[in-house]
Amino acid sequence: MPSLKHWILEGRRTVEVETLVWARWFENAENRVVMQEYEGDKLLVSTVFLGIDHRFVGDGPPLLFETMIVSGSGCGHQERTSTWDEAVEAHGRALAKALEVVVVEGTFP
């Protein structure tokens, strides 16, 4: 089984680090949340930095960011990306999907 690799953010750039460095950074990191969108008091879409590679199958760059639709249309949708910029793009797609039912039906689940 391959060993788990860890990353931190320096600004918006990911940097691979040793586990203890990651753990200390992760405990107090203030820039882990990339974006969150709310409709009233309900969280619709959340995009966060994971700090651990979530590419468990196949080859490719590490998947370090996660976007999830928490409520709204497409609730449960998840997309993982490798860079801050990709995460922002995924967030925009997820937000559009989460708001579909609001725009089309005029209701919020």
Image: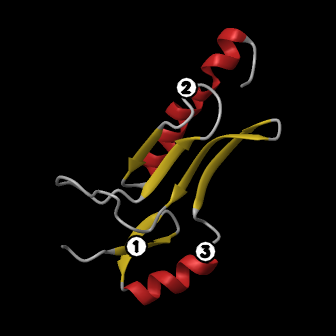
Q: Which type of secondary structure does the marked residue at label 2 adopt?
A: helix
- How crowded pointer 3 is (Cα within 10 Å; few <14, some 14-19, many 20+) is rated as few
Instruction: For residue 84, say whether it is visible.
Output: no
Q: Position of residue 90 (x, y in %)?
A: 47, 39
Return the residue at label 2.
97
Relative height, residue 75 to residue 28 (above, below)? above
Do the residues under discs 2 and 1 have CB atoms within 8 angstroms?
A: no
Specify few, some or many for label 1: CA neighbours under 10 Å numbering under 14, 14-19, or 20 or more.
Answer: many
Residue at image position (68%, 15%) is 103
Q: Is residue 21 left or right of residue 56?
A: right
Spatial separation of the CA atoms under disc 2 and disc 3: 29 Å
Q: Where does residue 84 sit, x and y in percent of width and height?
A: 46, 54
Quarter holding the C terminus is: top right
Tag in front: 2 or 1: 2
Please provide percent x and percent y for residue 43: 71, 42
Whether 95 is drawn above or below 14: the answer is above
For the point 57% across and 64% down, the residue is: 32
- Residues at circles 2 and 3 in contact by the CB criterion of under 8 Å: no
Depicted 52 relative to depicted 18: above or below: above
Please name the residue that numbered disc 3 is placed on: 29
- Identity, as a three-letter code, of the amino acid under mark 1: Trp
Quadrant in which residue 62 is drawn: bottom left
Disc 2 marks a residue whose amino acid type is Lys
Q: Residue at x 35, y 56 (%)?
A: 63
What percent of the width, then of the height, locates residue 24? 54, 86
The residue that appears at 66% across and 47% down in the rendered structure is: 36
Which amino acid type is marked by label 3?
Ala
Mark 1 highlights which residue?
Answer: 7
Q: Earlier in the sequence, mark 2 or mark 1?
A: 1
